[in-house]
Image: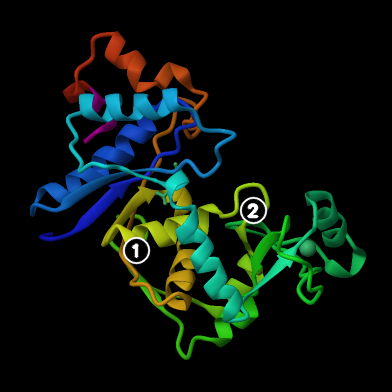
Amino acid sequence: MAGLTTRFAPSPTGPLHLGHAYSALTAWDLTQAGGGRFLLRIEDIDQARCHPVHEQAIHDDLRWLGLLWPTPVMRQSDRLPAYRAALDRLAQMGLTYACTCTRADIRAALSAPQEGAPFIGPDGPVYPGTCRHARHMAQGAAIRLNMDAALDTLATLPAFTETGPLHTGHHPLDAETLRASVGDIVLARRDIGTSYHLSVVLDDAAQGVSLVSRGEDLFEATAIHVLLQAVLDLPTPTYHHHRLVRDDAGKRLAKRDDARALARYRADGLSPADIRALLGL
Ligand code: GLU
Ligand code: ZN
């Protein structure tokens, strides 16, 4: 596809493993047919879990794989003013509220007998709405999206196009599903002032990403991203969710699976072509 822009957006919380290689190479390959752009973005909002050593290793591993990307590379830790501006705008629109609940408060509220079984959606247990009308100070609190108010701002609900093999097609958002399975999600954690969902939506738009290529584990979160794009008047990219690389026991690879770290394969003398072959690419 000519003119498309895709990205690989790892968090520097550990060594890249085969699953990351599959993700990066898939995004790269999608740009190669028609001279598209491949971007790297460092998702380091959670500074407590990120480390410069892992960030440097991301650059080294991807270059070893043969990938090229423009510099400077966007780092989410440099983008806090942009996240703050979007949160201010959503607050002015009346679509957010401050929440002081702890995890334990939420667990207790969700286990109240009248609540029934808590619904676990793509963002975890659906928040019971305790603080929705509490008028807490935003200082030191988490900021939540008021899902009902957000849906009310949209005359028609948006849709997205998926080109990945697992869910190919047109996916209109559904208000009832968003209310029941997503609800009032956190847009800004109290400790980091933003969230994965808000940052990824703002960054994909700021970087002109037209095809979001990423793992199947994030397919369910896409409705959240498309909703935020609509509320913030941002374009909706096309999405491509790929399969996850699993270990021999069928378990998805995690950062702690150092045995599958790319650096290990490299040290063992494998070539980038061997990695592609291992991954079936
Ligand atoms: N930073 C996310 C991760 O490492 C990827 C986010 C995305 O591709 O949307 O899982
Ligand atoms: Zn609360």
Q: Which residues are magenta?
A: 275-281
Q: Residue at x 55, y 67 (%)?
A: 87
Q: Which mark is residue 189?
A: 2
Camera-side residue of 176 and 53: 53
Camera-side residue of 249 and 115: 115
Name the kind of residue labelled 1 in the image. Ala
Residue 53 x/y as whole percent: 43, 22
Residue 127 x/y as whole percent: 73, 64
Q: Residue at x 19, y 18 (%)?
A: 271
Residue 246 x/y as whole percent: 43, 32
Kindly give the residue lying farthest to the top in the view shown: 268
Camera-side residue of 277 and 60: 60
Query: Quick check: 128 left or right of 197?
Result: right
Residue 220 in sight: no
Q: Is residue 40 above or below residue 148?
A: above
Query: Quick check: 157 left or right of 35?
Result: right
Q: Which residue is mark 1?
A: 205
Q: Residue at x 64, y 80 (%)?
A: 148
Q: Is residue 236 above or below residue 110?
A: below
Label 1 crowding class (10 Å Cα cut-off): few <14, some 14-19, many 20+?
A: some
Residue 143 in sight: yes
